[in-house]
Image (tube, helix red, strand yellow):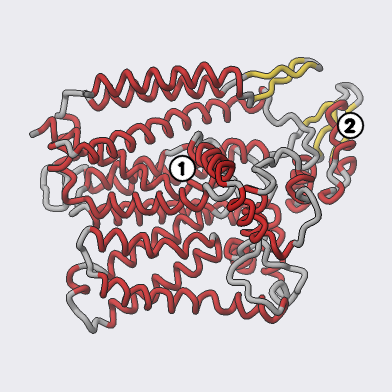
Amino acid sequence: MIKWLYVFFILSYSIALHQAFTTFTLVTYKVGNVFERLDLMGIELLLFVFSAIIFFSLYKYKDSTRINFFINSNSNSNSNSNYSKYFVPIVLLISFCLRMLTIIFFDTYPTMDAYQYFMDGIKIAEGGYFSDATNVPYWPAGYKIFIGILFFVFPQKLFVIKFAQVILHLIAELIMYKIVLKLSNNNFLMAKITLLLMAIYPNHILYSALIWSEILFLTMILLAFYLLILANEHELLMTKTSKKKYLILFVSGLLWGAAALVRPLAMFYPFAFYAAFFLCKKISIKISIKQLLVVFVAFFLMLSPWVYRNYKLYNKFILISTNGSLVLFMTFVVDNDGNKLDEMVKPRGSIDPNKLSDYALKYMMDNPYRTVKIMFRSFKKFYKSDFDGVESIIQSKIPKVISENDFNKILEKVHTAINLVNLKDVFVFEKNSNNYILKENLPEITRANTAQTILYSFSYPYWFSENLPLILIRFINSMFYYFTLFANGFLLFMLIRKAKHSRDHLKNIIPLYTLGLFFILINTAVYVMSQGDTRYHFPLMPWLFVGVSMVVLVRACRKIT
């Protein structure tokens, strides 16, 4: 059976490799004045195949002595007392060092949506943001508020946000470690593997240097999940009038509300938790409904100031943000054609901006075949790769040296709505080399304005030789990602086939797997209705790492027993 699967994956992705060489172009290299295109998607798929070989080789690895230590490592074991107790702090220290090195090595500035988060965060810190009707709730306000709080307490420096995100990710790693322990009957092997993979995953490391909401969102939802798990531990569950239980549920609801202000999808996650626990016979449907009521009372209580503010300023009910209808419209009516900014901002035809959702739903009803086709395309985009951190890092850097020819092209193509700085004021022309050199000691806001202006000229060739280290990181991350997908796909195959060894060794951790599966399905279902950006599966990765740990557990136990 293993050999059959091995042949199947190699053949299928060899075909995909051949197709990719003729259909996908990603990286641009600069050679003199001639731009040559190099197709790297094919190389990535080659790494995909290579990761499959590694996966099946490791799965068939016969020497179990090296993993015996981890299998037997638990809180009551004396054999690992000299080493195992240092595992978590050592991994967290490695994670911290990797992320701090990333912040130091990559000098990045907020661009794209991150630029608006950054500027609104400054406004919030300075006061008056929420009473100003020009600050429309197009984007969710949670991440802006987070930046605003940091800038109110600490200096208004990008390093403050980046350092806070490093700490937040460390907290997320520790919480995920605790979640795995709670839902796996204290299986330290799985918890350690999940913690280690979260700590060293390249794409997550790169996000520490970016002003994006992913790390904050991940930390908040994991903490909210952990509180729900605590509230449903056997001791509290059996106590019908426990004040502690309802306090934990209430705090969890507040966290879900705060997370929804960062990304509205968070409002669906409590349902994933209770569905998983109900199906696994952990709690009854009556208890689930009672707890959900407590959670959502706190949830709406957290949202109420924001809802009141929006109603007062705009005289209409806006729960979180208004961009959802535009995303739905762009995805289906504009048919996911986001190559030109003008088409995205000004969709075809004369439309009523208040009826974008109606247009999208009507289109979907009138064109069911095309709707399914678009959803499938979004699904492929959502899962086909996971190197968005590399792309965002590159597009968040300011080129320190620009050739005269490239500089003139940028000036010609600067977007009229995003001309935030006069580029000739921040660059100095050097006659000897015919290059424009970035001035030193520019304020951070000026640098952010410069990065945003250059990016939205759509004329600067970001992908060329100076980014080779990032391209190498991208290769490593791609192999890491594909390996993770293979492991989870194989785990699902084992569970569907009900293989004896998988049934025996995974029966105590089915609630953990079910919760992760429901969480992944909810995210997938929602984002196939949008443009399927790869960064949206950022919070899925810890749960996919749990799948990897389950495969290792099954293999290890199978060999030892």
Numbered mark located on residue 97 in the image: 1
Type of amino acid at the residue the image marks with label 2: Asn
Q: Position of residue 176 (x, y in %)?
A: 34, 53
Looking at the rendered structure, the secondary structure element under dot 1 is helix
Residue at image coords 28%, 49%:
513
Looking at the rendered structure, the secondary structure element under dot 2 is helix
| C-alpha span from label 2 to label 1 | 40 Å
User: Is 499 placed left or right of 166 in the picture?
Assistant: left
Q: Quadrant of residue 155?
A: bottom right
Q: Position of residue 544 (x, y in %)?
A: 37, 43
User: Is 3 placed left or right of 522 in the picture?
Assistant: left
Residue at image coords 62%, 80%:
308
Numbered mark located on residue 408 in the image: 2
Type of amino acid at the residue the image marks with label 1: Cys
Q: Earlier in the sequence, mark 2 or mark 1?
A: 1
Residue closest to the eye, 270 or 69: 270
